[in-house]
Image (tube, helix red, strand yellow):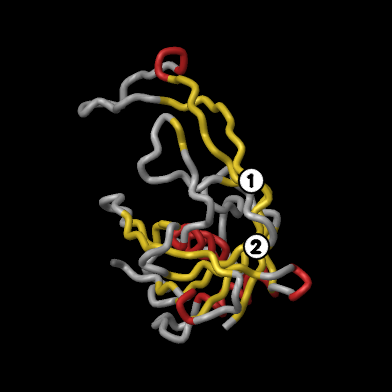
């Protein structure tokens, strides 16, 4: 098991039901963290590292929420052709929530993975010898514009970790898997705890 420190200056995790007003989850969803790690190591197949266990913690204060206005296109493509949709007619302002100063701890356990080279091993390779990794685009957490400052091995001086722990009565609902074909999500409930790490913090990434 290895713990990593991730720093992101600003990002957003839009809720599945968000439309004109894009609300954000306050904490990084497991599905997003898994996608981020795949992007880090240059893996495009979501199923390659199924079985990996991920634990997510928050370092420092809970990130603050700010609200911005951004332009977003609104139109439906024709069944017969793409059509022409000028911005002047098919764009309108939308509100979106952002999280600022997000510091995350990520712990990985690849003991139940079936991949020849596990996700934990690939992340270590990406951090120690990045020239061995083939990937493209910037490294983002969430949407493509949400570039991270960096990721490295966690150090005790980074601060105390508050872990997201699975709890059927928890008030924090987050997606743990998104089906790309149906866009349907599988959700779990969590509680944020100040206590030491415990087994209930593990989330197994699988195709539900």
Q: Is residue 72 above or below residue 51?
A: above
Q: Residue at x 38, y 64 (%)?
A: 169
* x 47%, y 27%: residue: 72
- Nearer-the-camera pick, 112 or 61: 61
> Camera-side residue: 106 or 49?
106
Give the mark, 1 or 2, whose residue is nearer the N terminus: 2
Q: Which residue is mark 2?
A: 6
Secondary structure under tag 1 reads: strand
From this view, report whether residue 87 is shown above or below residue 113. Answer: above
In the displayed orientation, state which residue is furthest to the right: 157
Q: Tell me where residue 80 appears, x and y as whole percent.
A: 21, 27
> Dot 2, how many residues are within 10 Å of its Cα: few (below 14), some (14-19), or many (20+)?
many
Q: Which residue is mark 1?
A: 64
Q: Which mark is residue 54?
A: none
| Distance between mark 1 and mark 2 Cα atoms | 17 Å
Q: Position of residue 62 (x, y in %)?
A: 63, 54
The extreme top residue here reads 88
Q: Where is the N terminus found, in terms of image quarters? A: bottom right
* Crowdedness near tag 1: few (<14), some (14–19) or many (≥20) residues, C-alpha within 10 Å: few
Q: Quadrant of residue 61?
A: bottom right
- Residue 85 sits above or below residue 123 on the image: above
Q: Name the quadrant containing residue 131.
A: bottom right
**Along the line of sight, the residue nearer the viewer: 130 or 197:** 197
Q: Where's residue 88, x and y in %? A: 46, 13
Q: Which residue of the protein is positioned furthest toward the left in this rendering?
A: 79
Q: Secondary structure at mark 2?
A: strand
- Of 118 and 91, nearer the camera is 91
**Does the image show residue 43?**
no
């Amino acid at each position: 098991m290895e713990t990593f420190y991730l720093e992101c200056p600003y990002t957003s995790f839009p809720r599945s039901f968000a439309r004109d007003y894009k609300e954000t989850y306050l904490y990084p969803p497991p599905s997003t963290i898994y996608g981020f790690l795949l992007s880090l190591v240059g893996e495009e197949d979501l199923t390659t590292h199924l079985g990996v266990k991920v634990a997510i913690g928050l370092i420092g204060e809970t990130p603050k929420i700010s609200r911005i206005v951004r332009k977003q296109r609104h139109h439906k493509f024709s069944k017969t052709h793409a059509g022409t949709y000028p911005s002047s007619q098919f764009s309108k302002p939308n509100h979106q929530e952002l999280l600022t100063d997000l510091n995350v701890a990520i712990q990985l356990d690849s003991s139940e993975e079936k991949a020849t080279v596990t996700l934990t091993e690939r992340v270590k390779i990406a951090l120690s010898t990045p020239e061995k990794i083939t990937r493209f685009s910037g490294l983002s957490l969430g949407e493509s514009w949400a570039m991270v400052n960096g990721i490295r091995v966690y150090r005790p001086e980074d601060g105390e970790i508050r872990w997201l722990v699975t709890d059927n009565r928890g008030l924090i609902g987050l997606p743990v898997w998104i089906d790309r074909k149906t866009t349907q999500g599988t959700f779990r409930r969590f509680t944020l705890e100040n206590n030491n790490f415990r087994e209930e913090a593990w989330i197994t990434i699988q195709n539900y």
